[in-house]
Image (cartoon, rainbow, N blue to C red):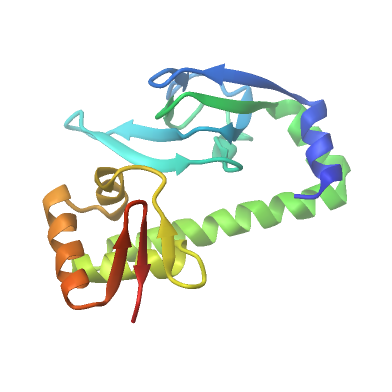
Amino acid sequence: MSDVTLQSLTDISKVRLFNKGEIVFQQGEQCSAIYKVLKGEVHLHRHDQDGKRVLLYRAYENNFFAEASLNSDQYHCTASCASDSSVLQIDSKKMMQILANDAQFSAQWIAVLSSELRRQRASVTRLNMNSASERLKHYLLTEGQPSGQIDLKGTLSDLAEVLGLSRESLYRTLRQLEQQQVIERKENSIKLIT
């Protein structure tokens, strides 16, 4: 977003600091704001019918979250901090007023939402792939740099969760793809070679 747009957000928001594990908002709470991660990592999640936590989204630095609840009365999920985090809390009603009155801001906001929608569609596509190696290669191509490299922001267990794989399956797949020289691994990165 442009500097002008970011200034508009700053005028209707405040910075909030959260500790690791702290809840930003709970599913079902009244929606009063959307958020942007300034530093840290925030997870959006729900629980399935068996009570198992289902990760919906990982928001990192410069990612917005809770935007799906912008015109809703309640939050559709819970947001919790995976690390100490600093977030911009943006007043929902004031955001809606800016969207209604500022065409340039609205166009830039649409671009942000469109980018996120493409990312979510890629995730759904990936989760429908049967092969662990295909999921990993797809992730490297769609979420990584143009070179096919990703810099890991969390642990391999976190990556396994994103890919919908068990840790064991991911570790086995990484080992196989390294042996086949399809990927190259470093301490905090994975790169698709072929």
Vertical placement of residue 168 versus 86, above or below = below
Vertical placement of residue 110 versus 24, above or below = below
Q: What is the count of numbered marks?
A: 0
Q: Nearer the viewer, residue 118 or 166?
A: 166
Q: Nearer the viewer, residue 188 or 164?
A: 188
Q: Nearer the viewer, residue 125 or 194?
A: 194
Please identify the quarter of the rendering in which residue 86 is found.
Answer: top right
Left or right side of 159 for 34 = right
Left or right side of 14 for 173 = left
Please identify the quarter of the rendering in which residue 175 is found.
Answer: bottom left
Q: Position of residue 117 (x, y in %)?
A: 53, 57
The residue most toward the bottom is 194
Q: Which residue is painted at 33% across and 40% down in the image?
A: 55
Q: Which residue is painted at 50% across and 32% down in the image?
A: 40
Q: Position of residue 147 (x, y in %)?
A: 48, 73
Vertical placement of residue 4 versus 16, above or below = below
Q: Which residue is painted at 50% across and 28% down in the image?
A: 75
Query: The C terminus is located in which quarter?
Result: bottom left
Q: Which residue is painted at 34% across and 32% down in the image?
A: 46
Vertical placement of residue 132 versus 151, above or below = below
Q: Position of residue 24 (x, y in %)?
A: 49, 21
Left or right side of 122 for 158 = left
Q: Position of residue 31 (x, y in %)?
A: 58, 24
